[in-house]
Amino acid sequence: MAAGERVRVPALLSRETTMWLAVGAAVVGVVAVLAWVGATQPENLPFVVAAAVLVVLGVVALVGRRTWLDVQHGTVVRETCFVPRGPVGWADAERVAFVNNRAGQVLLEVRGAGRRSSLYLPLVAVDVGGDRSQDPAFLRTLADQVERWAPRRDSVVAGLRAQAEHGESGGSVRTSPLARRYLASGRRTASS
């Protein structure tokens, strides 16, 4: 796929240094415990090797996750370690809705027709990682894609555009339309 045909969905990573230090310390702690168990209890070496492999696979899977918008075909694609998960088309999506993940984030849920699981695109976060929102340009691109491929999703398009306008005007994340509607009220979902 050419670079112009797909747009990467940015991750809403934490801006807090302490959060990253805590994650790093946790990984180092797990490795240290595994090394200690392996060195002091040779009979548990198979467990240590299996646990170490699981830790490495988990880190690789987390670091290797990417979500793309295929703007030429109107689909959302999630990749894990360069292995694409079946694309979900906007036009045939069974559900396109804003969702409060109950951890301080507003996500856009996209579920394909007949699928048991959904893809979630992060839009706004007000949590221990700090207040953050997607860039207004990305929100407009997302709104354009939903409007082009799934025109019956008016409330989603309006919500994305309102969030983009709020960000462009310099408004805070906490007072943004999506944060006020889905995080402050405790509402779980809203679809169009």
Image (cartoon, grey):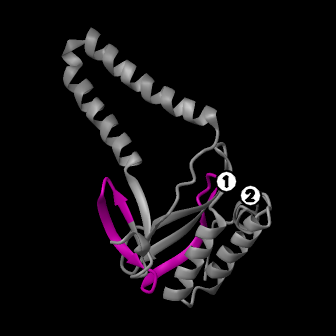
Could you tell me what secondary structure mostly forms the magenta stretch? strand
Residue 16 falls inside the magenta stretch: no
Where, quadrant-wise, is the N terminus in this rendering?
bottom left
Which circle's residue, 2 or 1, is located before the other in the chain? 1
* Residue matched to label 2: 173
Q: Secondary structure at mark 1?
A: strand
- Front-most of 94 and 5? 5
- Which image quadrant for residue 102? bottom right
- Which image quadrant for residue 30? top left
Q: Number of numbered discs present?
A: 2
Rendering coords of residue 6 (x, y %): 42, 71
Span shown in magenta: 78-105
Amino acid identity at mark 1: Arg
Rendering coords of residue 15 (x, y %): 63, 43
Left or right of 124, for residue 73: left
Rendering coords of residue 50 (x, y %): 24, 31
Tell me what residue is drawn at x 43 percent, y 81 percent.
74
Q: Residues within 10 Å of mark 1 (few under 14, many from 20)?
A: some
Tell me what residue is drawn at x 21 percent, y 20 percent.
45
- Which image quadrant for residue 60? top left
Residue 97 falls inside the magenta stretch: yes
- Front-most of 114 and 88? 88
Label of residue 132 in the image: 1
Where, quadrant-wise, is the C terminus in this rendering?
bottom right
Residue at the outermost top position: 40
Residue 55's place in the image compared with 183, above or below, is above
Q: Secondary structure at mark 2?
A: loop
CA gap between label 2 and label 1 equals 6 Å
